[in-house]
Image: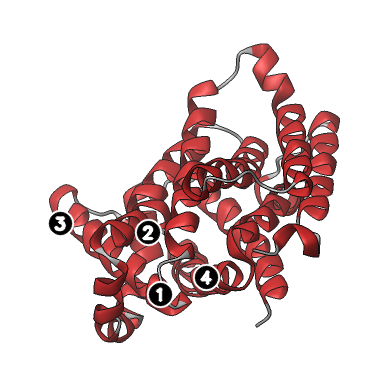
Amino acid sequence: MGGVLAAITVPVIWAIWLTATRAGVTGGLSALDAGLLRFVIPAVVLLPVAWKSLPAYREAGLLRCLLIVWGAGAPFFMIAATGMKQVPMADIGSLMPGTMPIFVMILAALVDRRLPSIAKLMGVALVLGGVLLFLAPSLIGGGQWQGQVTVMSAACCWAVYTLAYRNSGLSPWAAAALISSVSGVLFLGAAVHWGSHLLEVPTQTLLWQLAIQGVLTGLVSLAVYGVAVARLGAGASLYGALTPAIAALLAIPVLGEYPSVMAWLGLGLITLGVIFAVRPQAVRT
């Protein structure tokens, strides 16, 4: 799969995951149970990959592996799921993937000790403008800022994962196996200690959540995102800012949540910013 195709596929999967997770955690599914569905099945499937990748993990180093798990594993998931309970889908879709490129740019500039290109800076500026416009009604009205900060914290976690994975030397599947294995063990331990209510979840809900959390997101998205980062570098994260528009459209039939006119204007700015920033000369590293 080409880097650009992989990068375009990622926001579609993310939008589906965001919508499904919000529907789950606001519909009776606990964050712990959602995490079990998200990581345990991929952990079992990818266990042979994790075993074969042990030398690669040692080569990458303990700190880098921990940052990868923190940024895309159990800690990220719990932070994101907590935020999703507190704010509507419009805020989630805008703040999480919309601010992720900004965090990546800041962290990359600190790590690489060089400023991004003018094209990337202008693209990120448009994305930031779109995010602010998207959230203007909530900010003016003093809305659910705690949930908004939580969602942005999850975006920062994913930016850490992006930078940690970038030069790790791990293959996309090795990284996915690492994230799923460690996170699966953490969620299983938490379920043993605090208990799980998965058996009380309706079968239909359980099956479609399992398909989206465990298969589409747990197996497919991590590997596809890994391909995008390997081919395009940290600039791959900019494509993720397309997620708000996709998530907003999905929220209409699935959650019955309709974005405001201000939100649509913000989505337009975000999309324009991504298109501007990911032009070929902007993503070469």
Task: Point out the image quarter for the N terminus.
Answer: bottom right
Q: Are marks 1 and 2 in contact (CB under 8 Å)?
A: yes
- Mark 4 or 1, nearer chain start: 1
Q: CA distance from mark 4 to mark 1?
A: 9 Å
Asked if one can make out residue 29 in the rendered structure from this viewpoint, the answer is: no
On screen, residue 189 above or below 85:
below
Q: Foreground: 187 or 156?
A: 156
Q: Are marks 4 and 1 in contact (CB under 8 Å)?
A: yes
Q: Position of residue 196 (x, y in %)?
A: 25, 54
Q: Give the residue at x 45% y 68%.
A: 218
- Mark 2 or 4, nearer chain start: 2
- Mark 4 or 3, nearer chain start: 3
Asked if one can make out residue 159 in the rendered structure from this viewpoint, the answer is: yes
> Badge 3: how crowded within 10 Å, few (<14), some, or many (20+)?
few
Task: Point out the image quarter for the C terminus.
Answer: bottom right
Q: Give the residue at x 51% y 37%.
A: 151
The amino acid pointed to by label 4 is Gly
Circle 4 residue: 226
- Mark 1 or 2, nearer chain start: 2
Is label 3 in a helix, a strand or a loop? helix
> Badge 4: how crowded within 10 Å, few (<14), some, or many (20+)?
many
Is label 2 in a helix, a strand or a loop? helix
Q: Give the residue at x 24% y 79%.
A: 54
